[in-house]
Image (cartoon, rainbow, N blue to C red):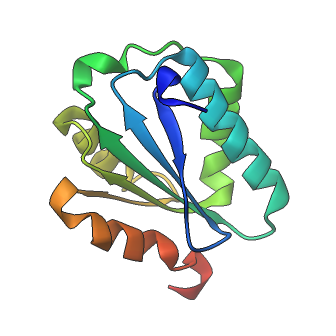
Amino acid sequence: MTTIHGVVPLPTDHDHVYAFDVTGDLDAQGMEEMACVLNAAFDRHENKINVLLRFRHFEASDAGVGINLAAMKAQIRSLIHMGRYAVVGAPETAENMIEFFNHVIPVNARTYSSNDEQAAWDFVNTPENMA
């Protein structure tokens, strides 16, 4: 994964945490690469994983990414295999969608401003089964 496709994995301090920078260069290949990483994580971990997405130089108009099978599979599997989901610096439309769906899906999802990134890391660093 490289910034060429708009998704860059970030180092984490815990095995159950997966984090990515998402940029305005996000394209279908970037989405597929991130989905493949998450699908492999769902296969590897017995317990739920937590995910942090940090948006950098991303505007709502950048979201014209096509849907692919790997991404759809990861989205469906996340309902069972993801405990916590934090988004940092998302465009307002994405933030509103995440806040809405947090009430109807079995994933503990939260949004954070770029100024509150440490709180997002604290949130995902706690395993869901220990909360």
Position of residue 124 measured from the top left corner of the image (x, y, whole percent)? 47, 69
In-image side of 21 versus 40 (left or right): left
In-image side of 54 versus 4 (left or right): left
Position of residue 36 measured from the top left corner of the image (x, y, whole percent)? 72, 36
Position of residue 110 measured from the top left corner of the image (x, y, whole percent)? 33, 60
Q: Is residue 113 visible?
A: no
Tally of numbered discs = 0
Viewer-side residue, 77 vs 71: 71
Which residue is pictured at 23% across the width and 26% down the height?
A: 59
Residue furthest to the bottom = 130
Position of residue 25 measured from the top left corner of the image (x, y, whole percent)? 39, 21
Which residue is pictured at 70% across the width and 33% down the height?
A: 73
In-image side of 60 versus 28 (left or right): left
Which residue is pictured at 24% across the width and 24% down the height?
A: 60
Q: Is residue 24 visible?
A: yes
Quadrant for the N terminus, please: top right
Looking at the image, residue 59 lies above or below residue 44: above
Looking at the image, residue 121 lies above or below residue 76: below
- Quarter location, residue 46: bottom right
Which residue is pictured at 67% across the width and 46% down the height?
A: 38
